[in-house]
Image (tube, grey):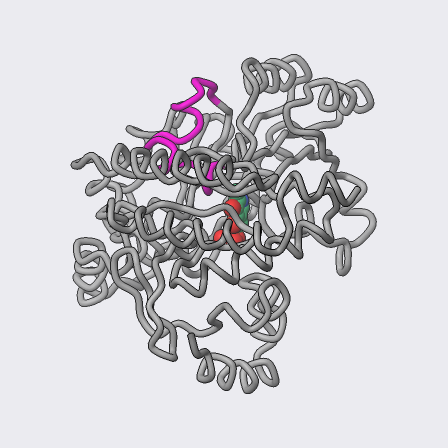
Amino acid sequence: MRLDRSFELDRKAEQIDALAAKRKNVIASDQMVEGRYPVFAERAAGAHFWDVDGNKYLDFFLSYGTVILGHADPDVDDAVVREIRRGFAVGLMKPVQTELVEELLEIIPGAEMGMLLKTGSDATGAAVRLSRAFTGRDRVVRWGYNGWHDWCAQWDNGIPEASRELVDTFTYNDLDSLRALFERHPDGIACVVMMPFMVEAPEPGFLEGVRELTREYGALLVFDEIRSAFRLALGGAQEHYGVTADLVTLSKAFANGYAVSALTGRADVLRTLEKVHISSTYYSNADAMAAALATIRKLRSGDHLAHIWRLGERLQNGLRELTAKSGVPVAVVGHPPMPFLDFAMGSEDDNQSAKRVFYAATIAEGVFFHPNHHWFVSAATTEADIDQALDAARSGFEALVAAGWTTEALGARS
Ligand SMILES: Cc1ncc(COP(=O)(O)O)c(C=O)c1O
């Protein structure tokens, strides 16, 4: 697989485009699997995309999970084009805004009101600001990936100490670690913002326990369902696990790739918006709202999520058979619509080395599994695609065995 054009464009981009210079460690073209992953895409359709060198990939990355119906879905794109042709940026509300919020209130548990924003970080940031204003408290407890703003950035560089001091995190599936934070700051925590799960599933009673603790200490519970809503179930992890938060952030899958996010939840909390500053010039733009409305209506009208679950289960079961047969210490993890492989070679360095071997083999067969981010299945993925994905994974596991990354060989080495 030649990637000459990708790397030629990348050499230019990294000189002038700061995001391009940094982004390498996201797709990890040279860091993770040296020289094997494409950097520039040309086009995409359904479950596939093509890079600028003309290589075709079966896509399990799906633009960070935003694309649920498949790339360039005609129903969604036509709805957007219609909205664009009617003038989508007027600055006043367009009816599609109310229609979309109405739709969200029907689907998302606990949604008495909603508001539309642009990005995921907008929605989580708004949830935090509203929670602070509503409770009159400053502290935030968070878990998972919640965006890039000061209160939740992954790296400390560029974040004032004073901001960092107000935010704590806890251990997933460990209620005691959360209780300890509440005991340390019984009247100080405005909200707990958390992804209901990332890869590991919640243990029975865990989400319910978080719900109880937040109530007990007068803090709001915010579920960050930016990845899970409209994918795990239409109503997200709240619907799947039967636990309802005070506020919920939504984005990604509900607009099939277009930039829109939402915050839904308790009306009394959302009405606090009257007293805080959250606004953007682009919040009233209707193009992505039209995309969201078309995406949701299509998801509601068919058995798309059942299809995604079924294929995700097939993929996970097939991967489990392959790992068992090849004897490699790799676990198949995640929920079926968002599967992933957990490498347990002994050390982080060994994990990275083994991943390099596996993912070099799968990308060579044209299957785009992301090495560092859980994967996604789309409604456009077919049974034949799962066959191809499992064939590629078989090559990956064979490469691991050939390179000596089996449980037996690792045991003999240690
Ligand atoms: C769970 C979750 N929350 C928040 C965000 C931030 O969204 P954005 O990148 O659109 O700001 C993401 C993005 O990946 C996410 O997955």
Pick the residue in front: 97 or 176: 176
Quarter of the image with the N terminus in it: bottom left
Q: Which of the 4 image quarters holds residue 74?
A: bottom left
Q: Residue at x 54, y 15 (%)?
A: 204
In the image, residue 227 sits, relative to residue 62, either above or below, namely above
Give percent across and percent down for residue 144: 61, 39
Give percent across and percent down for residue 174: 69, 22
Give percent across and percent down for residue 274: 50, 39
The number of numbered badges drawn on the structure is 0
Look at the magenta stretch and give its main secondary structure: loop
User: Seen in the image, is 385 located left or right of residue 397?
Assistant: left
Asked if residue 227 is among those painted magenta in the image, a careful observer would answer yes
Q: Which of the 4 image quarters holds residue 173?
A: top right
Pick the residue in front: 266 or 107: 107
Give percent across and percent down for residue 381: 27, 49
In the image, residue 279 sits, relative to residue 240, either above or below, namely below
Q: Residue at x 46, y 35 (%)?
A: 320
Q: Which residues are magenta?
A: 225-244
Q: Residue at x 18, y 67 (%)?
A: 85
Asked if residue 356 is among those painted magenta in the image, a careful observer would answer no
Pick the residue in front: 92 or 269: 269
Quarter of the image with the C terminus in it: top right
Q: Residue at x 31, y 61 (%)?
A: 48
Q: Is residue 279 visible?
A: no
